[in-house]
Image (spheres, grey):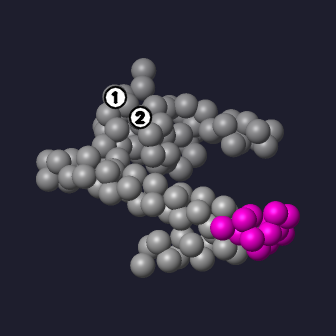
Amino acid sequence: MTPELLPCPHCGNAYPAVGYDSDMRALGRELCITARCRQCGAETRKCDNAKEAAELWNRRAPLSPAVLAELPEVRALVAAETERCAKAASDAVEAVCLRDPMPSVGRVLERIAAAIREART
C-alpha cells in the first residue's frame, strides 16, 4: 500500500498523486513511477515503485501556516499578471493585423514579445 502523500510543497494542493510517468510511456521506455501534483505539475524524480515515490515526495519540510495563508494572495497575483500579459499580447496582435492584414508570423511574435515586456515594466 502506498503511504499517504503530504500536500504539495509548491502550491499547497492537498491531493497529489502517485502514478506512471506518461512521458516515459510515450517514448516507449520502461515505465517509471513519480509522485506529482495535479495542480502545479511539481513531481519527484522517476522511481521504481509507488512506495519509493511517495517516500521521496514526503521527504521535505512541510509548508508553514504563514506560507499556506499567503497562497491565495500569490495565486491572485499570478492570475492578474497572466491576464495582463495575455491582454497585452492580444492587443499587440490586433495592432499588427490592423496595420498589415497578412503579417508574417515572426512580426506578430516579435510584437507580442515586446508588448509583454512593456506590460511587465
In the rendered image, residue 106 lying in the magenta stretch gets the answer yes
Question: Height in image: 115 above or below 69?
Answer: below
Residue 92 spot, x, y in % from top left: 62, 67
Which residue of the protein is positioned furthest toward the front in this rendering? Answer: 98
Q: Amino acid at mark 1?
A: Glu
- Total marks shown come to 2
Please give the label number shown on residue 16: 2
Question: Height in image: 18 above or below 80?
Answer: above
Residue 27 spot, x, y in % from top left: 79, 43
Residue at figure coordinates x 80%, y 39% from the top left: 28
In this rendering, which labeled residue sits more in front, label 1 or label 2? Answer: 2
If you read the primary sequence from the N terminus, does the residue marked by circle 1 or circle 2 appear first? 1
**Nearer to me, 116 or 69:** 116
Residue at figure coordinates x 69%, y 43% from the top left: 23
In the rendered image, residue 75 lying in the magenta stretch gets the answer no
Location of the N terminus by quadrant is top left
**Nearer to me, 97 or 5:** 97
**Residue extent of the magenta highlight:** 95-107
Tell me the SS state at disc 2. loop
The answer to whether residue 64 is visible is no
Please give the label number shown on residue 54: none
Location of the C terminus by quadrant is bottom left
**Nearer to me, 7 or 80:** 80
**Residue hosting label 1:** 4
Quadrant housing residue 30: top right
